[in-house]
Image (cartoon, grey):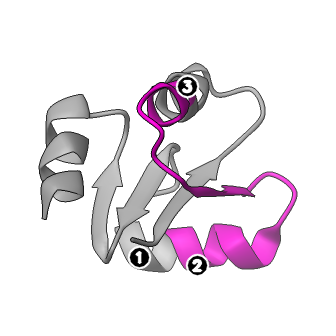
Amino acid sequence: MAIRVYTTPTCGYCNQLKQYFRENRVPFTEYNVAGDLRRADEMVKKSGQMGVPVVDIHGKVIVGFNKAEIDRALKR
């Protein structure tokens, strides 16, 4: 399952999200949109949002650290 996490270094919710994935042994690829403008543009095109975190779980895009929505997307 391909999981992409778009974050910034100073985002508290981003850190909570990554910790949640680590604790549950969910593999993910992280993109720091503060330092990678190409990934920042990709994130905005996917989500329509400038805020982080943005999570792409197999094409399902979730904005923010919404555990319930993330868990539903992981079960698919």
Q: CA distance from mark 2 to mark 1?
A: 6 Å
**Could you tell me which secondary element the residue under label 1 belongs to?**
helix
Packing grade of label 3 (10 A; few <14, some 14-19, many >=20) is: few
Whole-percent x, y for residue 64 in the image: 37, 39
Q: Residue at label 2?
A: 42
Residue 49 x %, y %: 42, 59
Secondary structure of the residue carrying numbered label 3: helix
Q: Give whichever of discs 3 and 2 has the lower sequence position.
A: 3
Residues marked 2 and 1 touching at CB (< 8 Å): yes
Q: Quadrant of residue 48?
A: bottom left
Task: Find out whether the residues at labels 3 and 2 contact each other: C-beta distance under 8 Å.
Answer: no
Residue 47 percent location from the top left of the image: 37, 67
Q: Quadrant of the N terminus?
A: bottom left
- Magenta span: 19-43
Three-letter code for the amino acid on which mark 2 is drawn:
Glu
Residue 74 in picture, x, y percent from top left: 24, 54
